[in-house]
Amino acid sequence: MRTFSPNNGMTEAEREKLSEIDAKAVKGANGDITSLSGLTTALSVAQGGTGSTTNAGARSNLGVAAKGANSDITSLSALIAISNSGYSQFGSDAPAIKFKKITGTTPTVNNATAYSTGIAKSDIISFTVQVSDSGDIWRLPNHGIQGTATEYYFAYINANGTLSISLPLESTAVHTCAFVCLITYEE
């Protein structure tokens, strides 16, 4: 910034005007700019701007999607593919994974009951069975010690893909109780 002495031949008004000019940014790099007001031309992406004065134009120039629902997204290659066909697929070369829920009632003590899963045993990855016992507690198979536990039962899927639940004689707490089975399988 220039300094003026009273004897430099300028009027007070001229000195004020020159001070205003000196306070403005100069051509080239300016480290003292703290705000831009009245800017009417959008800064390009290369200049650190968006290249647009509208949200949609800025998103387009930056290659980003809007917040919320988007109908313009055509690819999500880095995400897990989830199909609306009723299965999950973790990668394009991975198997399609499905789940099936079977519910029913356990047999009476010293009996077994069978439920068709409709799934080939070779396609089944895993299954879990839980029985709601007479105390309304969900029990997994083989809970307790066989021969003494009243909530002991067996659950397995045979070679035909049939779910079997069997109860030994002492399994009085889990006979004729509700059960749920969740099967994870490959399609």
Image (cartoon, grey):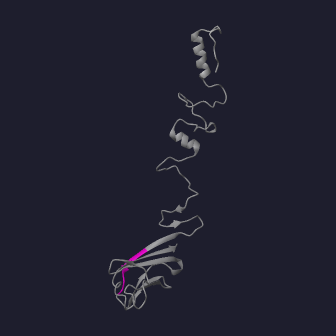
Tell me what residue is drawn at x 55 percent, y 65 percent. 90
Q: Nearer the viewer, residue 186 or 155?
A: 155
Q: What percent of the width, then of the height, locates residue 5?
A: 64, 12
Residue shown at 64% from the left, 8% from the top: 7
Examine the structure image and report whether residue 31 is included in the region drawn in magenta. no
Image spot of residue 37 (x, y percent): 53, 29
Which residue ends up furthest to the right in the rendered image? 28
Residue nearer the viewer, 96 or 110:
110
Residue 14 found in image quarter: top right
Residue range highlighted in magenta:
101-107
User: Magenta span: helix, strand or loop, mainly?
Assistant: strand
Relative to 111, residue 61 above or below: above
The image quadrant where one finds the N terminus is: top right
Q: Position of residue 147 (x, y in %)?
A: 41, 91
Left or right of 126: which side holds 32?
Answer: right
Is 74 rendered above or below residue 4? below
The quarter of the picture where residue 162 lies is bottom left
